Structures are given as structure tokens and as C-alpha cells.
Image (cartoon, rainbow, N blue to C red):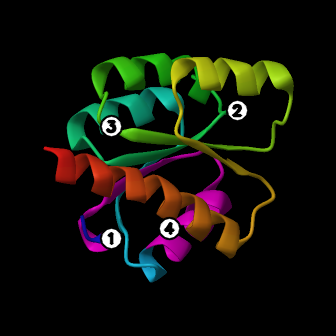
Amino acid sequence: MNKKDIEILLIDDNKITREILRVILRDEGYHVVGEATDGGTGLDMALKLRPDMILLDVVMPKVSGLDILPKLKDMLPDSLVLLVTASKDQETVSAAVRTGIHGFILKPFNAQKIIDTVHSVAAKLNNNSTER
């Protein structure tokens, strides 16, 4: 699967974080198909857009990333989810791992960390598409 064919949804309440992620991902050739500012809106967008990859913030108003994570995994089992978080506490990490996330992007982040993590997870999409 070519990078430009990989559709990514950003779910993060911080406008600057979304903008940084969008610019870095687009500069790398990925296709950012949507952005949401909270978990509820993000879940709705994910179900509508069915992206290949979702970058999901943990702490957001209204509905958190950890609240929608099990629903995303259940309703969109082929979408790969990366958590974007500043939280390094063991409880958050354990909950996310139990739900089946595919990676973490820890805040504060830099462009290379985002690129490396997304490339690594995108390789799983490439492996899945060749197995079909």
C-alpha cells in the first residue's frame, strides 16, 4: 500500500497538535482524511470515513480516547490505532495495550518520532494487504 493511499484520521482536542500532525503526515505523503476535537465526534467520523489509521489523543473533553478505543477496535477492526498522549502512567499504558493499540506517540513529540512511528505501523497495513 502506497503512503498516499493510507487514510489517517486525527482525533485530538488540541488544534496545534492536530495541525502539527497534519502537516508532518501530509509532507510525508500520507492522506489525512479528517480531524475531530473529541472522542464522540471522532468515533462518528471514524465510522463514516473508515480510515486505515487513527491517531487518537487520550485526554479530551466530553469523551476520552480511552473511552472510545474499545468501540473503535470492535467496530473498525482493520483500522490501526496509535495513541497520542503525554501520559506515561502504567494504568493508561496497560489499558491501551489490553485494548489492542498498535503504537504510541508520546508528547512532546518531534517530527522524526511521528514519522518513524507512523511508518512502522503503516508497514503492518502493507503486510495485511499482501496477505489478502
N-terminal-most mark, 3 or 4? 4
Three-letter amino acid code of the residue under disc 2: Val
The Cα–Cα distance between marks 3 and 4, rounded to whole angstroms, is: 16 Å
Three-letter amino acid code of the residue under disc 1: Lys
Image depth: mark 1 or mark 3 in front? 1
Q: Which residue is mark 4?
A: 22
Element type at mark 1? helix
Element type at mark 2? loop
Crowding at dot 3, Cα within 10 Å, few <14 / some 14-19 / many 20+, comes out as many
Residue toward you, 12 or 110: 110
Relative to 116, is 61 above or below? above
Residue 44 in the image: x percent, y percent? Answer: 33, 30
The Cα–Cα distance between marks 2 and 3, rounded to whole angstroms, is: 18 Å
Q: Which mark is residue 93?
A: none
Left of 63 or right of it: where is 113? right
Three-letter amino acid code of the residue under disc 4: Arg
Tell me where the magenta segment starts and ends, as one range: 3-25
Q: Is residue 64 something one can see in this rendering?
A: no
Q: Which residue is mark 3?
A: 46
N-terminal-most mark, 4 or 1? 1
Crowding at dot 2, Cα within 10 Å, few <14 / some 14-19 / many 20+, comes out as some
Q: Quadrant of the C terminus?
A: top left
Left of 67 or right of it: where is 2? left
Residue toward you, 59 or 99: 99
Residue 60 in the image: x percent, y percent? Answer: 65, 33
Q: Which residue is mark 1?
A: 3
